[in-house]
Amino acid sequence: MSLLAVRDLAVARGGLRLVEALDFALAPGQALVLRGPNGLGKTTLLRTLAGLQRPVAGEVICDPDTLAYAGHADGLKPALSVAENLGFWSAVFGGAPVGPALAAMNLTELAARPAHMLSAGQKRRLGLARLAVTGRAVWLLDEPTVSLDAASVGLFAAMLRGHLGQGGAAVIATHIDLGLPEARLLDLTPYRAMPGRQADRPAGFNEAFA
């Protein structure tokens, strides 16, 4: 059984096709790490998987209610405390307890601190802790370790490993080693769209919205 599958998928940014002919499937407990040079389309692919934009071709097969997306923005409310931010997201996604999420990312002692008083690394840890209160099975993660020190990367890797151990799955765009030897690597370079395939498209045509 697959939690997420794509078939002959093509994605585009600004009318330019980036990645095409992509096929993969993720079963419970599996993680897929996306690799490739900057600008190749990793973020665009994750946004497409998350349903934030339409694919150019092919299909994404999953239940949208199983997806949780963590992009470059941490999605925090500055005036709320650390615990209140997690409580807000918990309420949105069904009421999971916030205590384990605080502990997982070493935020328990910061629970009462307003988010606007956190360092960049602390904000990132809080943004990632949101994943633990979503109850969603498939995590889509775009460079999740930005602003994290080595110890915090280890915390995140442990949280991710726990998620996989409970039957979850993850697709992660990252350039660093998360210490997950069981994760599959997918280099998107061989799936780079060929420029010649776009020659017959009129100027200004944005196929992402076709």
Image: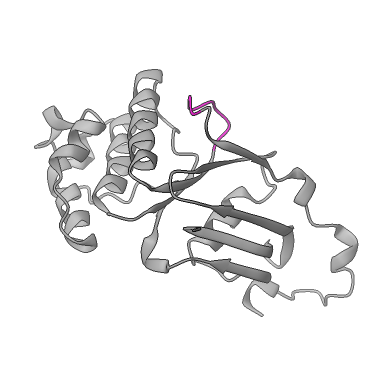
- Residue 190 is left or right of residue 136, and the answer is right
**Which residue is at 18% across, 38% downward?**
100
**Which residue is at 17% across, 41% downward?**
82
- Residue 129 is left or right of residue 189, and the answer is left
Query: x%, y% of residue 28?
Result: 44, 49
Query: x%, y% of residue 108?
Result: 14, 31
Residue at the limit of the structure toward the top, as seen here: 150
**Which residue is at 49% across, 43% downward?**
30
Q: Is residue 163 magenta?
A: no
Say whether residue 85 is visible.
yes
Query: Residue 104 is drawn in which quadrant?
Result: top left
Above or below, 203 relative to 72: below
Q: Look at the magenta stretch and give its main secondary structure.
A: loop
Query: x%, y% of residue 162?
Result: 33, 36
Query: x%, y% of residue 36?
Result: 68, 39
Color style of the picture: one colour
Query: Residue 156 is drawn in which quadrant?
Result: top left
Give the magenta-colored segment's residue range.
174-180
